[in-house]
Amino acid sequence: MSTFLLEIVTPEHKVFEQQVDMISVKGVEGDLGILANHIPMVTPLRIGPMKIKEGGKEHWIAVHGGFVEVRKDKVVVLAESAEMPEDIDVERAKAAKARAEQRLAMAARSKQDSLDFRRAELSLQRAVTRIKVSQKEW
Ligand code: ATP
């Protein structure tokens, strides 16, 4: 199987750089599988898990927004933040999920602050993604 170079970069650091066989990401327009020799393109990503297949192994990464760029020589994922399962603090993610759910319930009751609602929703998506990736769940 042909491989391609995958780089996952955040404003803080390079999270991943390796030759891989295939990646699956959550694009804003749906799930997307990318193999070697994919046509060049750029598409925004949702907050969600990302799966990487490499030499019979599977890697999971929590990708928090950003976009994927398919170039001729490599594929680059530029994310606001991204974590490998071993770097995820599951208790912290569970606490963030509970806080976000509380904020969503409060925002729904007050029916006022839609910005607060949106922030809580994004926070919930990040927390759920971290929990899923730590359990290797798509
Ligand atoms: P929290 O409310 O727990 O801070 P958050 O979703 O608001 O979560 P972010 O703003 O997305 O956090 O991330 C800030 C930094 O903390 C990033 O570097 C991110 O990788 C890291 N981070 C956030 N939550 C976790 C976690 N559960 N485990 C490991 N790193 C985390």
Image: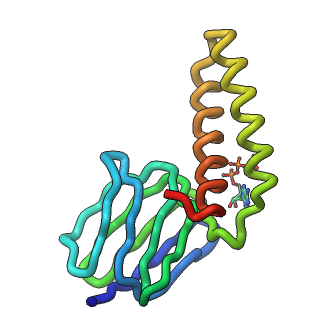
The coloring applied to the image is rainbow
- The N terminus - image quarter: bottom left
Q: Residue at x 44, y 67 (%)?
A: 77
Q: Residue 129 at x, y = what percent?
A: 59, 52
In this rendering, the count of numbered labels is 0
Q: Residue at x 68, y 10 (%)?
A: 110
Image vertical order of residue 11 relative to residue 126, above or below:
below
Q: Residue 133 at x, y = what percent?
A: 60, 61
Position of residue 37 in the picture relative to residue 70 (left or right): left
Observer-nearest of 105 and 41:
105
Image vertical order of residue 132 relative to residue 77, above or below:
above
Q: Quadrant of residue 100?
A: top right
Q: Residue 98 at x, y = what percent?
A: 76, 37
Q: Residue 48 at x, y = what percent?
A: 51, 53
Q: Quadrant of residue 70?
A: bottom left
Q: Residue at x 55, y 54 (%)?
A: 64
The quadrant of the picture showing ligand 1 is bottom right
Position of residue 107 in the picture relative to residue 10 (left or right): right
Q: Residue at x 35, y 83 (%)?
A: 21
